[in-house]
Amino acid sequence: MYKIANLKNALAFGLLFSCISGIGQGVITSPRVPSPAASVSQTVGISTITVNYSRPSVRGREIWGQLVPYGWNVQGFGAGNEAPWRAGANENTVLNLSHPATIQGHQVPAGSYGLFFTISKDNSGEVILSKDSKAWGSFWYDPKLDEMREKITVRDGPQTEMLTYNFDNITRTGAELVLSWEKKEFPVKIEFSVDDIVMANAAEELKNTVGFSWQGYASAAAYALQNKVNLDQATKWADQAVQQNKSFATLNIKADLLNLSGNTSEGEKVMKDAIAMATEVELNNYGYQLLGQQQPDKAIDIFILNTKRHPESPNVWDSLGEAYAIKGDKKNAIVNFKKALSMNPPANVKANSEKYMKQLGAM
C-alpha cells in the first residue's frame, strides 16, 4: 500500500508539474543540480577576464576518453557537426574579455566567446573560442564562427572533484587561465598590452570629468613616466597639469619627464621652481625619492633645506639622520637622530630614530 501511494503521489506530482509548465514560462527559479553555475574573474592591469560556466562532478565516472571523448566528436543532436568539448556543463562556457588580449599567441578582440577544449590520449589539446557564446553546449557548434583555435598541452594535476576554473602565474601583463577537473589541467595563457590599454583609456577619461582637474592630467603623465611609455603625450599632459595647478606635484612630474627625455638642463630649472614652493611633506618625500634613486648626496641637500625651513619639526631631523645613515656617515647620522629625539617627537619618528641609534651603537 505504501509503495502504491508513493507511486500515485509521484505520478500526481509529475502531472501537476507538466501542467504548470504548460501554462507558460512563469515558473519559479529553482536550484540547478547536479552542475551548479559559477563565475570566476581576474583583473590584469585594468582589464578583466571572466569565465561563466557550470560545474559537473566526477562522481566516480571515467572522464577522459569516456564522458569527455578524445578529440572532436559528432554530436547526436543539434547541428550534427564534429565539435569540441564545451569545457563545462549545460550552456556554453563563456569567456569575456574587457579589452583585446593575446591568447596562446593569438590576438583576440574584446568581447564574449564560447570556450571549448579538446584533449587527446597523449595530453595534447586545443583551446577554441567561438563567436557564438549563447548556444547550449556543443550541440550547435559551428567551426565557421571560430575566433581562434590554438594548441595547448594538458597536464596532470591533483584530484579535483568539481570542474573548476582559476587563474595561476599572474603577472603585471597576464595570467594563466586553468581548467581543472579529475586529474587534468588545461592551461591557457592570456596576456594584455597593459600600458597601451592604460594610455588609451587615460586619453578617453581625460575627455570626460577627469579632464576637468589637474590631478587627472598629472596621474596620466605620472603613469607614463613610471612605465616609460608615450613620453611625448605624457609631456603634454604634464604641461596641462602645470597650467591648471602650478605646484610641486605637477612641476616634479614635468621635471622628471624632461630629465628622462635627455633635457636635463631644463629639467633642473623646473625642479628648482618646484623645490621653491614645496611643503615640508613634499620636500621630505622628494628627499626619499632621491634616496630611492641612489642619490644620497642630493637627498641630504634636500633634507638639510627642509631643516632650515622647518627647524621646529622633529621629522625633518630624523629624515636627515636617516639619509646620513644610508650614506654611511655615522657621526652626522647620530647628531641628527639625537636632535630629533630631543624635540619630543611623535611615536613613529621616535621609533625610527631609536631604531637607527641602536643600529649605530649609540643607545
Image: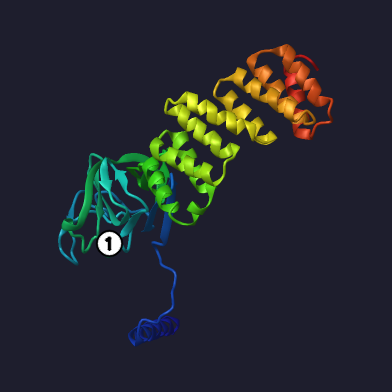
> At numbered mark 1, what does the secondary structure look like: helix, strand or loop?
loop
Residue 303 falls left or right of residue 186: right
202, above or below 153, in the image: below
Tell me, yes or no, if residue 315 can be seen here.
yes
Residue 281 falls left or right of residue 179: right
Q: Where is residue 273 in the image (x, y as percent from the top left)?
A: 59, 32
Residue nearest the viewer, comparing 314 with 306: 306
Q: Position of residue 337 (x, y in %)?
A: 77, 21
Number of numbered discs visible in the structure rendering: 1
Q: Residue at x 70, y 28 (%)?
A: 306
Residue nearest the viewer, comparing 267 with 302: 267
**Which quadrant would the N terminus be assigned to in this image?**
bottom left
Residue 350 falls left or right of residue 155: right
Q: Residues within 10 Å of mark 1 (few under 14, many from 20)?
A: many
Q: Which residue is drawn at 42% across and 57% down?
A: 39
Tell me, yes or no, if residue 352 can be seen here.
no
Residue nearest the viewer, comparing 143 with 179: 143
Q: Position of residue 226 (x, y in %)?
A: 47, 34
Q: Which residue is drawn at 18% across and 59% down?
A: 142
Give the quadrant of residue 315: top right
Q: Which amino acid does label 1 sit on?
A: Gly
Give the quadrant of residue 184: top left
* Colour approach in the figure: rainbow
Q: Where is residue 34 in the image (x, y as percent from the top left)?
A: 39, 63
Q: Residue at x 30, y 60 (%)?
A: 92
81, above or below 45, in the image: below
Q: Name the residue under label 1.
A: 137
183, above or below 336, in the image: below
Residue nearest the viewer, comparing 262 with 107: 262
**Which quadrant would the C terminus be assigned to in this image?**
top right
335, above or below 50, in the image: above
Residue 112 falls left or right of residue 275: left
